[in-house]
Every structure is written in structure tokens, then in C-alpha cells.
Amino acid sequence: MTGRWQVALGVNVLLGIPGVIPIWLLWFLAASWTSGPEPTDDDPMVFWLPIVAVIVVPYVMLWLAVNRSFRRRSPLEPRTYWLLSALATFLPTTALIIYSP
């Protein structure tokens, strides 16, 4: 029973590998909205919303379904479990940021 949270941690790291794309898309969308459009950019950001929705929403639904399943069997407190799951999901993205040239 004590190893169940370690399995959930590993699954969240594995979910974070394809999660690099939705995380990057959300970062790009937020950075584009906060910094304003480029002076030579003619495309409005509203065209990105369907693309982001098609990629991010299924990923979030999958992430929540997997983690709800593991949460029921985990000995951790709910707050601790969700925090560790979110941090483990961001590990691959963080590794790419740190080790990018």
C-alpha cells in the first residue's frame, strides 16, 4: 500500500511527457496576450483558441481521469496528492527548459 503513491508519481511524470505540448501552448497563449501582438503580426490570437482547446481539453480530461483513479487508492492526503501530481506532471517541461540551449 505504501508504494501506490510512487506509482502515481511515476504515472504523472509519464503523463507530463506528452503534456509538454499543452503546457507550452498555454504558456504561449498567456505570453502572447500579456505582451501584446507583434507589430508585424496580422493574425489575431482568437484563431489559436480552437487549436488550444482541441489539444488542452482532452489532455486535462485524461489527466484528471487517471489521477482520480489513483487518488482513491493513494494513502496520501488529497491536498498532498494533487500537489505532488501537478509537480510531477511539470517535471518533463521543467527539464526541457533547464536543458535547452
Image: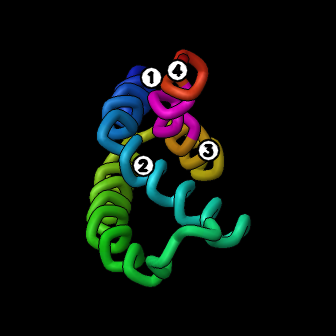
**Mark 2 residue element:** helix
* Gap in angstroms between the C-alphas marked 1 and 3: 18 Å
Q: Do the residues bearing badges 1 and 2 touch, measured as CB atoms within 8 Å?
A: no
Label 4: which residue?
A: 100
Q: Amino acid at mark 4?
A: Ser
Quadrant assignment, res 61:
bottom left
Magenta stretch secondary structure, dominant: helix
- The CA span between labels 2 and 3 is 12 Å
Local SS, label 4: loop
Q: Position of residue 18 (x, y in %)?
A: 30, 41
Above or below, 35 relative to 82: below
Residue at 48 percent of width and 77 percent of height:
42
Q: Residue at x 49, y 25 (%)?
A: 96
10 Å crowding of disc 3: few (<14), some (14-19), many (20+): few
Mark 4 or mark 2: whose residue is earlier in sequence? 2
Alpha carbon separation for disc pair 4 and 3: 26 Å
Left or right of 88 in this view: 16: left
Which residue is label 1 attached to? 2
Q: Nearer the viewer, mark 1 or mark 4?
A: 4
What residue would you read off at disc 2? 71
Q: Secondary structure at mark 1?
A: loop
Which residue appears at 45% of the width and 28% of the height? Answer: 92
Select label 4 or label 3 by which is in front: 4
Residue 16 lies in magenta, yes or no? no
> Which comes sooner in the sequence, label 2 or label 3?
2
Q: Quadrant of residue 20?
A: top left
Residue 60: percent from left, percent from top: 37, 61
At 54% from the left edge and 65% from the top edge, which residue is drawn?
Answer: 29
Q: Residue furthest front?
A: 40
Query: Residues in magenta?
Result: 87-94
Asked if residue 98 is positioned above or below residue 48 in the image, the reply reads above
Q: Which residue is mark 3?
A: 83
